[in-house]
Image (cartoon, helix red, strand yellow):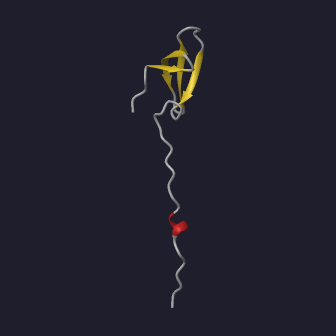
Amino acid sequence: MRIPKIIHNRNREYIFVKEYKDYIRYKDMITGSMTCFDKQELGLVKEIIKPNIAEGRIGRRKL
């Protein structure tokens, strides 16, 4: 997904400044302070939980 240039969060507008490996830096348009958001907070990455395959298996005996 592409990174949004302007985001609205907590009744504030932030403008994109720079992307880093773990987070994205935004600047508040009103106060000028810098704020960092990780990709999961922006909805760019969704957490995927893989089911444990051996968990639902019933043990079988060899004869």
Examine the image and state in which quarter residue 6 appears: top left
Q: Position of residue 7 (x, y in %)?
A: 48, 20
Name the residue: 60% across, 13% down.
Answer: 33
Q: Position of residue 27 (x, y in %)?
A: 54, 15
Q: Name above or below for residue 15 compared with residue 48.
A: above
Name the residue: 54% across, 15% down.
Answer: 12
Q: Name above or below for residue 47 compared with residue 32.
A: below
Residue most extreme to the bottom: 63
Residue most extreme to the left: 1
Q: Is residue 4 left or right of residue 55?
A: left
Q: Is residue 22 left or right of residue 2?
A: right
Q: Name above or below for residue 41 compared with residue 34.
A: below
Count of numbered circles on the image: 0
Q: Name above or below for residue 3 compared with residue 52.
A: above
Q: Position of residue 51 (x, y in %)?
A: 51, 58
Name the residue: 52% across, 68% down.
Answer: 56
Q: Which quarter of the figure is the N terminus placed in?
A: top left
Name the residue: 51% across, 44% down.
Answer: 47
Q: Position of residue 23 (x, y in %)?
A: 54, 30
Examine the image and state in which quarter residue 4 appears: top left
